[in-house]
Amino acid sequence: MSNEVYIIGTGQTKFGEFFDLNIGDLASEAVSKAIKNAGIGKNEIRTLFIGSTVSNSLSQSSIGGICTRSCSLSSNAYRIESGNASGAAAFHHAFLSIKSGLYDVVVVLGIDKLSDYVQNGTIEKILASSIDYQWEYEMGATLTGLYSFLTQAHMEKYGTTLEQLAYIPTKNHQNGVLNPKAQYRYAIPIEKFLNAKRIADPIGRFDIATPCDGAAAIILASERYIENKKTHSYKVKILSSSVGSDTLALQHREKLTELKATKIAANDAYHKAKLTASDINLAEVHDSHPIGEILAIEDLGLVPKGEGGKASVEGLTALNGKITVNPSGGLKARGDPFGATGIAQLIEIVEQIRGNAGKRQVNDVQYGLTQNVMGTGVMSYVSILGRGEN
Amino acid sequence: MEPPKIWRERKERYLGIGIMCEDCKKKNFPKTRICPDCGSENVKPYKIAERGTLKYFTQIMNTGDELVFNTPYVVGLVELEDGIKVTAQIVDCDFKDLKKGIKLEQTFRVIARNGKEGLIKYGFKFRPI
């Protein structure tokens, strides 16, 4: 028997501001839903992999014990931090733990609670922990400031325009309307993005994904477990889970017109899944800033380099366009509870593959891809999921 | 804003000391003990160029609490005359008058303040020549 890894259950809280819920409350909702969805017993879970960027406002870095207690689990637990890509990093390690033959059933939980940080400047400082804190942030840059440089580099080299960039959040808000778990379920006209005050020129104040609260959980199981138990209600196959890296600081990169980490991760993910970019018609990508989605679709090879802006305006990436990108609403409309984002992306693909995505269902889904980015691209995680019978 | 950290970084922040690799001859900032390009341990201190060109810049409206006192301010990616690139604030100019490609020179300034009574952190910024 081969050592394939499958997703057999998912659970997610709504994303948004939940002042009355703590990190344990959010964890228990997502994990309980996922366990019920998978039809497994709690005692079968060997490990809880937690992807979390800042844990919670109590400065409790070790949130493993809080999550196992509030979920009534007796398994061990790890917290994995990889900035805004902590969810995807935890998923990657959970995948490896089963792929290696060590475990048969594990839970991956992506979680963050950011609505506690109401004081001006705190969220900017948290976001700065995933860029070069000493030589970018302390010198005056912010994550959005650096994304401004990436935006300018793309505009300069490929002629990408502000109108093209504004299509990204406009499209993602249209998709978010159809997602019951999204924080912002309303469309925003493109003029709103274009006319907004610039917070790090050319990036406007409405262009950026908003940090919020949320948790999302996935149950992974080995082929051996699934064949023996036969209790699962569905299985979605993980065709590949890959990661690429680059320098932490933009000033140490040769090019600012691409995310090298995404290219490395994508090449590895396509190779392991025995697919090419032309097989993909569904992707959930890291649109924390509009240029993020343009760089993603280009560096994943879904559109030719430099044509990401044009492709977006032409509707290629719209819901049921040639390649549907961010049918969930993306980070922008779904809301961005950092660690939970990477897991929510994977859950969206699972729902789409199962045909459970309701009004935002994409036609003819065979495969789905996710891309989750740390900082300005120091790490990029790419995963490809496919139908269970493959 | 921890005092030992400010003291430890004094040569980099106050004097712009990075490294040059004796083997591959590449220059790097900030300093490392091993050359990031070739892995050689044969590195020596190197003072980075004090003049450069503005590659990209933006105006920061929202930032972390130690830097908020300064907002709005301009931050840029500067390519120095020796090829090293650094991120730094651009001062003594108006955001709307700035243009890519202009020549800049290093200037010693207050970088961050830790409240009204805490430490003041100094370091380099750039201004148009």
Image (tube, rainbow, N blue to C red):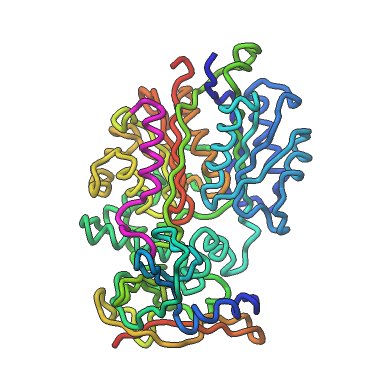
Q: Is residue A271 magenta?
A: yes
* Residue appearing at x 41%, y 29% in the figure: A272
* Residue appearing at x 62%, y 68% in the figure: A119
Where is residue B127, by image quadrant?
A: bottom left
Q: Is residue A372 above or below residue A357?
A: below
The location of residue A182, given as percent across then percent down, is 52, 43
Say left or right for A288 vs A92. Answer: left
Front-most of B46 and A321?
Answer: B46
* Residue appearing at x 38%, y 24% in the figure: A365
Q: Is residue A38 above or below residue B116?
A: above
The location of residue B109, given as percent across then percent down, is 47, 87
The location of residue A276, given as percent across then percent down, is 31, 30
Say left or right for A157 vs A243. Answer: left
Q: Residue A176, can we see it?
A: no
Say left or right for B97 vs A2. Answer: left
Quadrant holding the C terminus of chain A? top left
Q: Is residue B116 above or below residue A181?
A: below
Query: Which region of the structure is painted magenta?
Result: A251-275
> What's the magenta bit mostly, secondary-structure-wise?
helix
Q: Is residue B45 above or below residue A348?
A: below
Q: Is residue A152 magenta?
A: no
Front-most of A251 and A88?
Answer: A251
Q: Residue B95, can we see it?
A: yes
The location of residue A191, given as percent across then percent down, is 32, 57
